[in-house]
Image (cartoon, rainbow, N blue to C red):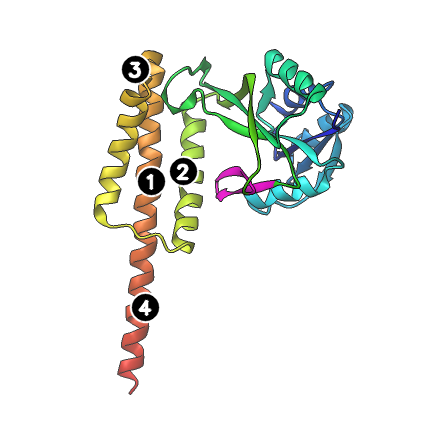
Amino acid sequence: MPFISGVIIAYNEEKYIARCIRSMQGVVDEIVVVDSLSSDKTPEICRSLGAKLIQQPFLGYIEQKNFALKEATYDYVLSLDADEALSESLAASIKEVRQKWLYDSYRFNRMNRFCGKWMRYTNYYPDRKLRLFDRRKGRWGGVNPHDRVVMEKGATTGFLTGDLLHWMCDSLQEHMDTINRYSGIAAMEAFKNGVRCPVWKVWYKPLWRFFQYYVVKRGFLDGYMGLVVSRHAAFMCFQKYARLRCLLLESRRKTEDGRRKVEGGR
């Protein structure tokens, strides 16, 4: 039976962190919390629940999670965000698979709670995540802020029953704040990676995102909140590409100004 380290990254998560840690107790052999210098009671709560607390200034979502992997004692890792928790059925599935470990990693469904409602449609469910894995064969990758576990070529992946529960936000304003923060990070990462952004992307991509969430993924079956989630997803997409285009235009303007100065100085 493999030993498992539970790892969490956190910053000012006093509202959620206790629930996250308690859901992992009895499932993993240690709990490691990497805290980005919280100013609330997050550190005290972690220590009171027996978690190993490590203070580390925020490095970026992907970088912070990979740092947390290195701090784990054991090679098999269960990685959660502070606003997530194992459901009883998922906890039972992990306990069961420990008795007969067959794969290098495991996926499971994540259910998202949006403004007090558990979403069962749109892209918010089943929202499958790979969070239980052998760190010798996988690490965090993707593009900030949308991190994901990337397993090496040839690694095997199984599926566990039960849901990972995620408390996304308690209010629309909270979610709008997240959209503004995440879209800015995503635009900057795309800019650094040389992603192009013709005008058509600014209008076409958000329209497709709304159609995908509301029609293809049947968001309309989630009622009013399905409409809100679909609209917010489209708006975040718009914000990302609009900001990216502004960055590209500003970079182009600076390049042209620099060229003019050089030509004018000849």
Q: Residue 246: image x %, image y %?
A: 31, 52
Farthest-out residue, bottom? 266
Q: CA distance from mark 4 to mark 2?
A: 28 Å
Q: Which residue is mark 4?
A: 255
Q: Which residue is pictured at 48% across the width and 43% down the height?
A: 142
Coordinates of residue 206 in the picture (x, y in percent): 28, 35
Instruction: Please provide the residue range marked out in magenta.
Output: 138-152
**Of pointers 4 and 2, the one earlier in the residue sequence:** 2
Q: Position of residue 251 (x, y in %)?
A: 34, 61
Q: Secondary structure at mark 2?
A: helix
* Label 3 CA crowd tier, 10 Å (few <14, some 14–19, many 20+): some
Spatial CA distance of label 4 from label 1 is 24 Å
In the rendered image, residue 220, in percent from the top left (x then y), is placed at: 30, 15
Q: Which residue is label 2 attached to?
A: 180
Amino acid beneath label 3: Phe
Label whose residue precedes the other's in the sequence (1 or 3) = 3
Q: Residue at x 66, y 41 (%)?
A: 136
Q: Which residue is mark 3?
A: 220
Query: Which element type, helix, strand or loop, lies under badge 4?
Result: helix
211 in the magenta segment: no
Residue occupied by mark 1? 239
